[in-house]
Amino acid sequence: MRILYVEDNMANVSLLKRVAHQHTVLNYIDGEEALHNIAVDKPDLILMDIQLAGTMDGLEVVQQLRKEGYTLPIVAVTAYAMLGDRERCLTAGCDDYIAKPLSIPRLVELIKHYEQQTTPPAPSADHDPTQSAESEESL
Ligand code: MN
């Protein structure tokens, strides 16, 4: 599946790319840029950091996406450890919430969960599941 991770901390993006190496991971550090490209990027799952580069925060981006009729899953990624933060994310239109620092088991679980909701790609004759061909992996 195609995972769009809107995040301005590249260490977190690298971590997701390692965990989700059999998926395509797209990244923007700027929420407005992500909004502008969403129709072209066509992600199956969005992970949305809250504090972003640029003028919009993650929750504003989510609110805008939902206002535009975007229905696919969005998971908030936030370092805010405050009580009630989950509520703010859900109110903004997120489906779920994951806390920073990112936990690898939690990421694996999350990806597995949304994988099952996404239509698998048609099998192709030359596809070798034992071979990982992700170029981003070298980051
Ligand atoms: Mn951030």
Image (cartoon, rainbow, N blue to C red):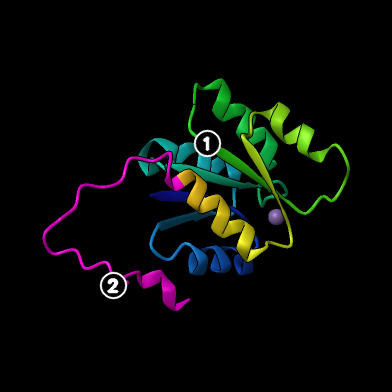
Residue 56 in view, yes or no: no
- Dot label at residue 73: 1
Which label belongs to residue 15? none
Residue 11 in the image, given as x and y percentages of width and height: 62, 69
Q: How many labels does the image show?
A: 2
* Residue 44 position by quadrant: top left
Residue designated by label 2? 130
Quadrant location of ligand 1?
bottom right
**Label 2 to label 1: alpha-carbon separation:** 28 Å
Mark 1 C-beta to ligand 1 under 8 Å: no
Q: Is the C-beta of the residue carrying label 2 under 8 Å from the nearest atom of ligand 1? A: no
Q: What element carries label 1?
A: loop
Amino acid on which disc 2 is placed: Thr
Of the pair 55 and 114, the residue shown nearer to us: 114
- The spot of residue 24 in percent (x, y) is 39, 57
> Residues in magenta?
115-139
Q: Is residue 2 shown left or right of residue 106?
A: left
Verify whether residue 101 appears in magenta: no
Most frequent secondary structure within the magenta stretch = loop
**Left or right: residue 75 compared with residue 111:** right
Q: Residues within 10 Å of mark 2 (few under 14, many from 20)?
A: few
